[in-house]
Image: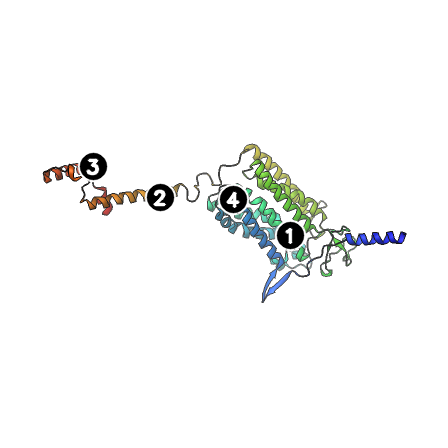
């Protein structure tokens, strides 16, 4: 009986211990062209974020095409900023002993720090918004949920690259890592044994980001947030999750006062976001009336209407001229004409002299 119980317990443990396998391949080739999973995940995230932002931007009164125009500036700036932050926060693989500085340019191998991407991406977005004459704060509010979804999709690239996972775990959803990618155990200085499972921090962040995106959408609909408050809520919710997820990771990173640099960054940025959310809410309790900058009319707005009015006025004048030409410059009915032709022409000339030059003659000239 004891043997049967032990066998059942072992079978149950085996059934529950269904580890998450790592993908066997992260790059495919179309002839000489490499298709890297990390790059594909980033691109897919950008596309989804743009689509979500378009819908939210139009709901706020913007023009859908503006999102693409602004993204044209924000995306390249964000990629450069993300890479710079990653290299700054994890310099050893590039500038440490045995490091290769050239590898800092290999973005396709992974390594984009979100805070650098947001900071420099905001500069690009500001340039795009100024060129379109719209508010950066409004654009940031429309973007925030889509940005979280993009980050969630981008984490799939870390899974394919077998990177940025957490500490060893015995949980049923532990992540399997292939032998070439096993990290060094800091306690022993030796590579972890084959079969060791690790926390799938990429999955934790995916779930957190998607839940946070849904929360932001609900919060915005419920309270009609504006003036950048949705964006600051994004920063606050993301950093809250990033703190505990970052604490689980064991990849190489700079430490300050015993904590990873990214943990300190998340704490400081998160607290700043909460303060900004509260202060802006007290100053601007209502959502802004539109997305245009003050003094900048929407595309197809007042200027377009004025131009259309001018066209209609010109067409009416032309119609009047054509009618005048058809009647020989005389709009009076035959019944009203005097018997003496010369007397009628005299009155016509007198009226013309009183009314000024014939506008039709000026237009025809």
Residue 186 horizontal/vertical position (percent): 76, 53
Estimate the x, y position of residue 245 in percent, counting from the top left: 69, 47
Check contact, mark 4 vs mark 2: CB within 8 A.
no
User: To which residue does mark 3 refer?
Assistant: 355
Q: Give me the residue at 36% from left, 41% from top.
A: 306
Mark 2 residue crowding within 10 angstroms, few (<14) / some (14–19) / many (20+): few
Which mark identifies residue 57?
A: 4
Q: Is residue 96 left or right of residue 146?
A: right
Label 2 with label 3: CB-CB less than 8 Å? no
Q: Say if residue 113 shows up in the picture.
A: no
Q: Earlier in the sequence, mark 4 or mark 2?
A: 4
- Disc 2 marks which residue? 308
Asked whether, in this view, residue 55 is left or right of residue 24, the answer is: left
Mark 1 or 4, closer to the camera: 4
**Considering only order in the chain, which callout, 4 or 1, is on the residue closer to the N terminus?**
4
User: Is 106 placed above or below 299 here?
Assistant: below
Does the residue at mark 1 contact the one at mark 4 (Cβ under 8 Å)?
no
């Amino acid at each position: 009986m004891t043997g049967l119980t032990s066998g059942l317990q072992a079978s149950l443990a085996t059934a529950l211990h269904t580890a998450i396998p790592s993908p066997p391949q992260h790059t495919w080739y179309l002839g000489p062209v490499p298709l890297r999973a990390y790059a594909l995940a980033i691109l897919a995230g950008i596309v989804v974020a743009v689509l979500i932002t378009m819908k939210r931007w139009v709901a706020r009164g913007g023009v859908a095409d503006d999102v693409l125009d602004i993204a044209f500036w924000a995306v390249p700036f964000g990629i450069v900023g993300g890479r710079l932050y990653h290299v700054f926060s994890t310099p050893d693989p590039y500038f440490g002993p045995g490091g290769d500085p050239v590898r800092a340019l290999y973005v396709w191998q992974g390594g984009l720090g979100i805070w650098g991407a947001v900071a420099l991406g905001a500069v690009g977005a500001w340039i795009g918004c100024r060129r379109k004459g719209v508010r950066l704060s409004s654009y940031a509010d429309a973007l925030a949920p889509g940005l979280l979804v993009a980050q969630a999709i981008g984490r799939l690239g870390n899974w394919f690259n077998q990177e940025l996972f957490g500490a060893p775990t015995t949980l049923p959803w532990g992540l399997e890592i292939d032998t070439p990618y096993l990290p060094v155990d800091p306690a022993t200085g030796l590579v972890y044994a084959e079969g060791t499972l690790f926390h799938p921090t990429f999955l934790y962040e995916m779930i957190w980001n998607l839940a946070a995106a849904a929360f932001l959408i609900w919060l915005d609909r419920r309270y009609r947030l504006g003036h950048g408050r949705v964006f600051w809520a994004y920063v606050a919710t993301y950093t809250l999750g990033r703190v505990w997820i970052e604490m689980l990771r064991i990849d190489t990173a700079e430490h300050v006062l015993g904590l990873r640099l990214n943990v300190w960054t998340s704490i400081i940025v998160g607290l700043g976001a909460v303060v900004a959310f509260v202060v802006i809410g007290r100053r601007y309790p209502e959502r802004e009336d539109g997305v245009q900058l003050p003094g900048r009319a929407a595309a197809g707005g007042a200027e377009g209407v004025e131009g259309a009015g001018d066209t209609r006025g010109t067409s009416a004048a032309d119609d009047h001229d054509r009618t005048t030409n058809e009647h020989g410059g005389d709009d009076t009915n035959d019944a009203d004409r005097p018997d003496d032709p010369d007397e009628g022409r005299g009155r016509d000339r007198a009226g013309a002299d009183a009314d000024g030059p014939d506008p039709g003659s000026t237009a025809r000239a």
